[in-house]
Amino acid sequence: MTVLKTSMRNFLAHKGRMALSAIAVLLSVAFVCGTLVFTDTMSTTFDKLFAATSSDVTVSAKGASDSGETTADNGKPPVMPASVLGEVRKTDGVKSAEGTVFSTSVTVVDADKDNLSPSSGAPTIVGSWNATDARTMKITSGAAPEGGDQIMVDADTADKHGLKLGDEIGVISAVGTHKAKISGIADFTVTNPGAAIFYLDTKTAQQTLVGETGVYTNVNVTAAAGVSDAQLKKNVTAELGGDFQVKTAKETADANQKDVEGFMNVMKYAMLGFAGIAFLVGIFLIINTFSMLVAQRTREIGLMRAIGSSRKQVNRSVLAEALLLGVVGSLLGVGAGVGLAVGLMQIMGQMGMELSTDDLTVAWTTPVVGLVLGVIVTVLAAYLPARRAGKISPMAALRDVGAPADAKAGWIRGILGTVLTAGGAFALYLAAAADKATDGSLWLGIGVVLSLIGFVVIGPLLAGAVVRVLGAVLLRMFGPVGRMAERNALRNPRRTGATGAALMIGLALVACLSVVGSSMVASATDQLDKTVGTDFIIQSDSGQLITPQAVKAVKSTPELERVTEYKWTKADFTTPDGKTLKDTAITAADPSYATDLRTETVAGKLPDAYRPDSMSVHEKFAKDHGITLGSKIKVAFKDGSAADLTVRAITSSDVVIDAGAMYTSITTMAKYVPADRMPLDTLVFASAKEGQQDAAYTSLKSALHDYPQYTVRDQTDYKDALKDQIGQLLNMIYGLLALAIIVAILGVVNTLALSVVERTREIGLMRAIGLSRRQLRRMIRMESVVIALFGALLGLGLGMGWGATAQQLLELEGLMVLDIPWPTIIGVFIGSAFVGLFAALIPAFRAGRMNVLNAIATE
């Protein structure tokens, strides 16, 4: 009880000093709990949506994916004859059945040909209006579509794009473009998953999406009273045979949930990973806080020991304070986490995915995880300061506050830090020298962990040398005030090292990712320059295949010298070693593709692969299956017949663009795949006539004006698009790392604030002998800047080392160019100085307002 009372008294007496540490715990716990609540809410939302939109039993074509989406290479949804509907209706246990048609391989545009697809990446769905959709959609304006000139749109899409009744929109599919006017607007009665949904009548949907009537993509079946879904599935399967997919409502919902589960898991664990980094940074803040509090209370603890307190009691007293800090910070963090989740839901709403707070899901495990994690991390972080407090002897009551550190401990730290850092450097060397990416990645992980821990341990020793250099470069120009700031930063190297280490972790990750991202862009750009011999690349950013009409428009451009079509499909390969490889990708292109993409070969010549009944394979595939030039491979084309193709070329596996591709000609594929089943083009390449590149670029864009689903890019555009994609990914990661950097800034603020309290008497004496308030504030700001730059130097140096090693490892996968983004590195370093200035504002302001006489009288 005495220990608890002492801990409570000390905690309340220093509540101001504990506040920033509590905020660090709060932020870290909030990020964990917010992530869990947000992903649980998304899961609940989709569970409700899929449950509401699933029929008791759904029958779909054999070629459909598990979730029923389009998978056909010709851009059309897999269909089944309308006769299936009649067979289902006469099956025992069926109350009703309805045939539907839908497709996700569509683009919908307004009258100005602006794309109406969601910007969030959610699908655009065009289908026939049916009873199942009527359960989840309520017509709020107009009426359901009747006839080929009418279409209905969901309310969210209408609001976003300003659509109203009577507006004309166009549906672009593999069949062609269908124009209709909006007859109705329907609102979701369940949460909108972010998709843009358009409804046609059944006959129009069949003609628009498939190109023929009398077919369906799905048959939605409702069970009669007393018939279970499982029994109904059994009855329908028995009636239809095994030529169709038959799923119960639960199986359909599970398949749909599985589609989004992968995305949610990636997002969940990525965010939890960044929360873990924030926790790691928070550990340094908490260690610093308690170390300084213990040092400041050395005399007090010595007196407690002198009047009979045992080491265990002192130790438990400090740990009890940490426990209180962890509980308070974690409780607040759990509440903040729920608020964070609601904020994330609002952000998703801005992106088009409407998540209702009615579905807000806070599982009982979420606050438990937050509390346990926050408390355990806080108590563990306080263990070393608590242990140090327990070692304070009664004689410390006679010494000044902040007794010097144990010299032996400093030597041990130096040796341990050097060993760890050297071990990390050696592991990074082994990663860079690895022959296989899988082996190297293990050494890379070990190297990152060891070098990080090594820098943290050796940080106080590095602080002396680095701070002196920074002081000589930056502080000496400020005269005596600059020298005092340098000495203050050097006064306690352990504190400076721990504070800098907190900032170092976040900046090391920023630097590493910047190097890897920049190297990816530079390598891809280098590969494009070396291998791509075409002027223009035409493709759909949404993955929609290129229709014959669009290809014809490209070929009609007069300024073009050649146009190359590129398509791929899957086939079953039977190799010379007798193995059959199911669903193996094979690429078909025009012979000019050998010029458009200068792929290196290790045997034969690539143009020969485009001869009749010929193909190429990549080097690794050839080695794995004993294939040489002249070998025969039996290729059973999907939706076609089998062919015996002769291997005429073996391409290098050390390429980035089209890595692992196996080529044949479109003519060869057309010989074995019926014309109506030939896959559509994935890409189209075009090369301009000599000196007409600019004119061809303008003409191509004009020729594809009626096909807004496709983008024309020259090589510069393509490089910019690649750079933007990687840049967006890095910006998102930097945003998540900002949490760790914010916690590190709190650490600098806390260190300075406690340092000011520790030096209260010293500050009073300096003010008494003539130091002005402005000079005092400047001294504290410069001290903060030096600490921040110390952490930045360590972090950026460490991160660039990690990034360079990662690039060497990824060179095995084709990332051949190491590019250090010096503008980013220099910008982050300069930004760290401003971080130091910002962190020092409040401590410097408080120091400047101290009463001189009261400060001198402080013990």
Image (spheres, helix red, strand yellow):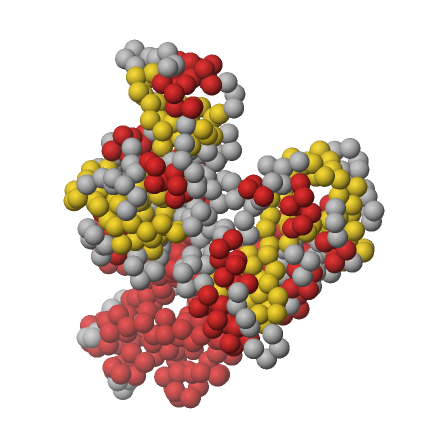
Q: Quadrant of the C terminus?
A: bottom left
Residue 773 appears left or right of 456 = left
Q: Position of residue 643 (x, y in %)?
A: 72, 39
Residue 730 vs residue 586, the one in the foreground: 586
Residue 421 vs residue 230, the one in the foreground: 230
The answer to which image quadrant residue 671 occupies is: top right
- Specify whether residue 422 is in view: no
Q: Is residue 2 above or below residue 280?
A: above
Q: Is residue 478 above or below residue 593?
A: below
Q: Position of residue 23 (x, y in %)?
A: 29, 55
Residue 822 vs residue 163, the one in the foreground: 163
Q: Is residue 210 above or below residue 221?
A: below
Q: Is residue 366 above or below residue 766?
A: above
Q: Residue at x 32, y 51 (%)?
A: 179
Q: Position of residue 417 (x, y in %)?
A: 58, 59
Q: Residue at x 51, y 53 (%)?
A: 548
Q: Quadrant of the N terminus?
A: top left
Q: Residue at x 72, y 54 (%)?
A: 610
Q: Position of residue 151 (x, y in %)?
A: 27, 45
